[in-house]
Image: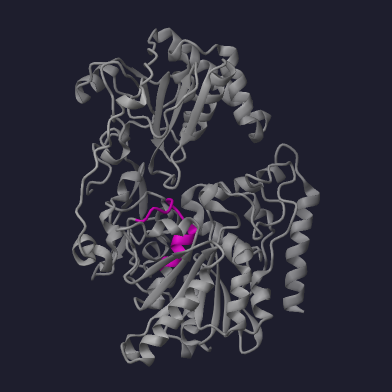
């Protein structure tokens, strides 16, 4: 059975990638499961989708913990613990990563023994390229399986993208096939993982908590604004930066409009951005009357949530 | 209310510190979250939110909450019924003198349009009949956004949703929820937009002082469901007002009053062409009949207003 996990940010097409790959396997007469995470799929937030494909009935359920292949559509997610990119990766797991850095750099940085390849065919950090990330991710994955023909892959793209119209299908076919061919040239392939019987399942690493009174077991229940513990600044791919020389201390429009309340106003009347929580929607930049806010790419910074 | 009666005389009177906590699971550029944080700043901490299933269900995932007070989750059709229970419990506590009247809380329903215009309308109607003292906030993103933007009773004519993918988009029309409320003589009802924060603040101030069933119907541009860059959320909201597609109005003392009448309305195209959900009206061939139909609907509405 093949076990494949796609990691990206909401909006980068990981669900589409898993659909295309799943359908391609299906056309090749495999039993298939494909599913995205449900409930927390928010634009910019770390998301994943997965595909299982087997020659016999698949009895495994739930997220994949022992992947044969991990596709990372956004390399800024690697250091984000909540993204869980490296979960269950072993020396047998192939890692395909969308990055300007060399595979060898990633192998060393992450101390990996398995093969690492960079994803071919998308320009990293180019906003226009985001809409092709899904199809390119699916193409790279399909190519390294070695069991999906280009014809089946193309048919899968047609089937999954059809509702978006012919023009979009054509663009995706072109980019998908290009990436498929480039990946084949890389010569990397994944091995089919063995089926694990239910008896060999490992118990999840539960933390046992004894039964306590609510005051002890749920002490935070009356705490206010605990959501601030969630560092949603990690979702950001661009950051707004205020030029205080140009800020005219208006009626704090940026602070009023910021959906997340991540812009406060200090005693002098200047806005201050909370980068731990700013999701990078850039409404502040779009609405700032004297155009005192500009966009800076997060790409290349080590951590998304650090202070400027 | 004359300007002299409001504490929000100008933009500088708007809150510069915010009550709603950061770190929520709403999407970047969420128009609904923007409107909620603007409303919450005016309503204050002494609130209990009764949240029907929808995007905003994800605001409070134990143990995390952006609120300063209580929050309760109900099924999609039942937020006003939940609000009745909370109101009754508070009233009982007061009657039994187990809670000081000064500690009383405001009961606020928070639902999306799927619930407010459709599934929850029956329990809303019953709550209005009973004269329940509650504020109903609907963040209207014109579709079932949390599950992938299927059409709802609030979806506008011609919009593409994941369940109206045809070349002509959604064949139905947006239900007029404001008029349904107004026809039932509520204590107060108003439409607001996060892009118009001063108008919003004055309306929340009025809704807050009224007693009985009250509606705040908030346009909530949705970057994911409507198909535009998150930075344009406010711009899209402003265009909805300037084109006359989203009239800002209130029902007060038995009358409907428009609070902001666009002097020269922009053509509806200016609003539609900025959004992916209407792209099929322009590409690959322009669908003039639908565009004219939408414009005619807006013109007819304002003719009725301006007389």
User: According to the image, what is the colour scheme of the structure?
Assistant: one colour
For the residue pair B292 and A157, the one nearer the viewer reads as A157
Picture mark count = 0
**Which quadrant would the N terminus of chain A be assigned to in this image?**
top left
* Residue B42 drawn above or below residue A162: below
* Residue B216 drawn above or below residue A59: below
Q: Is residue A229 highlighted in magenta?
A: no
Residue drawn at x 50%, y 65% is B195
Q: Is residue B27 highlighted in magenta?
A: yes
Residue drawn at x 34%, y 63% is B66
* Residue A300 drawn above or below residue B202: above
- Image-based side of A12 in relation to B261, left or right: left
x and y percentages locating residue B100 in the rendered image: 31, 90
> Which residue range is magenta in the image?
B24-37
**Quadrant of the rendered image containing residue B263:** bottom right
**Quadrant of the rendered image containing residue A150:** top right
- Image-based side of A285 in relation to B183, left or right: left
């Amino acid at each position: 059975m093949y076990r494949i996990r796609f990691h990206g940010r909401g909006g980068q097409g990981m669900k589409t990638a898993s659909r295309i790959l799943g359908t391609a396997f299906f056309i090749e007469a495999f039993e298939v499961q494909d599913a995205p995470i449900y409930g927390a799929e928010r634009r910019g937030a770390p998301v994943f989708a997965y595909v299982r494909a087997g020659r016999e009935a698949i009895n495994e359920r739930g997220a994949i913990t022992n992947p044969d292949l991990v596709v990372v559509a956004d390399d800024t997610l690697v250091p984000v613990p909540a993204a869980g990119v490296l979960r269950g990766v072993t020396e047998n797991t192939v890692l395909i990563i969308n990055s300007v850095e060399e595979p060898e750099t990633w192998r060393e940085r992450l101390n990996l023994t398995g093969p690492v390849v960079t994803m071919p065919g998308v320009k990293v950090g180019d906003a226009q390229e985001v809409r092709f990330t899904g199809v390119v991710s699916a193409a790279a994955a399909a190519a390294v399986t070695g069991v999906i023909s280009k014809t089946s892959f193309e048919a899968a793209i047609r089937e999954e993208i059809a509702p978006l119209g012919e023009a979009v299908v054509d663009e995706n076919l072109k980019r998908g096939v290009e990436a498929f061919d480039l990946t084949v040239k890389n010569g990397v392939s994944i091995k089919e993982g063995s089926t694990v019987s239910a008896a060999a399942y490992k118990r999840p690493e539960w933390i046992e908590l004894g039964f306590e009174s609510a005051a002890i077991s749920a002490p935070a229940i009356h705490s206010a604004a605990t959501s601030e513990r969630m560092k949603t600044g990690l979702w950001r791919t661009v950051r707004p930066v205020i030029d205080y020389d140009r800020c005219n201390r208006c009626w704090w429009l940026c602070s009023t409009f910021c959906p997340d309340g991540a812009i406060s106003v200090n005693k002098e009347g200047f806005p201050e951005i909370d980068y731990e929580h700013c999701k990078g929607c850039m409404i502040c930049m779009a609405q700032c009357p004297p155009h005192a806010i500009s966009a800076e790419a997060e790409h290349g910074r080590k951590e998304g949530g650090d202070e400027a | 209310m004359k300007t002299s009666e409001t504490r929000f005389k100008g933009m500088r009177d708007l809150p510069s510190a915010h009550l709603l906590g950061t770190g929520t699971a709403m999407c970047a550029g969420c128009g609904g979250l923007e409107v909620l944080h603007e409303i919450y700043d005016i309503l204050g901490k002494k609130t209990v939110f009764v949240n029907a299933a929808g995007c905003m269900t994800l605001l409070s995932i134990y143990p995390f909450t952006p609120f300063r007070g209580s929050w309760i989750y109900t099924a999609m059709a039942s937020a006003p019924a939940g609000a009745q229970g909370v109101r009754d419990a508070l009233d009982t506590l007061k009657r039994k003198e187990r809670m000081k009247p000064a500690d009383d809380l405001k009961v606020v329903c928070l639902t999306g349009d799927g619930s407010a215009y459709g599934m929850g309308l029956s329990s809303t109607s019953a709550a209005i009949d009973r004269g329940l003292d509650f504020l109903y906030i609907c963040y209207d993103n014109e579709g079932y956004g949390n599950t992938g933007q299927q059409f709802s009773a609030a979806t506008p004519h011609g919009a593409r949703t994941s369940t109206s993918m045809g070349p002509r988009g959604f064949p139905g029309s947006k239900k007029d929820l404001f008029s349904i409320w107004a026809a039932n003589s509520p204590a107060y009802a108003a439409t607001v937009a996060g892009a118009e924060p001063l108008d919003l603040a004055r309306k929340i101030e009025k809704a807050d002082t009224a007693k009985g069933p009250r509606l705040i119907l908030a346009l909530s541009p949705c970057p994911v469901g409507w198909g535009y860059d998150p930075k344009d959320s406010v711009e899209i909201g402003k265009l909805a007002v300037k084109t006359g597609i989203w009239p800002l109005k209130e029902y007060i003392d038995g009358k409907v009053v428009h609070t902001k009448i666009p002097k020269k309305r922009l053509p509806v195209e200016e609003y539609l062409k900025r959004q992916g959900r209407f792209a099929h009206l322009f590409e690959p061939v322009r669908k003039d009949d639908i565009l004219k139909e939408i414009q005619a609907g807006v013109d007819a509405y304002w003719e009725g207003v301006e007389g």
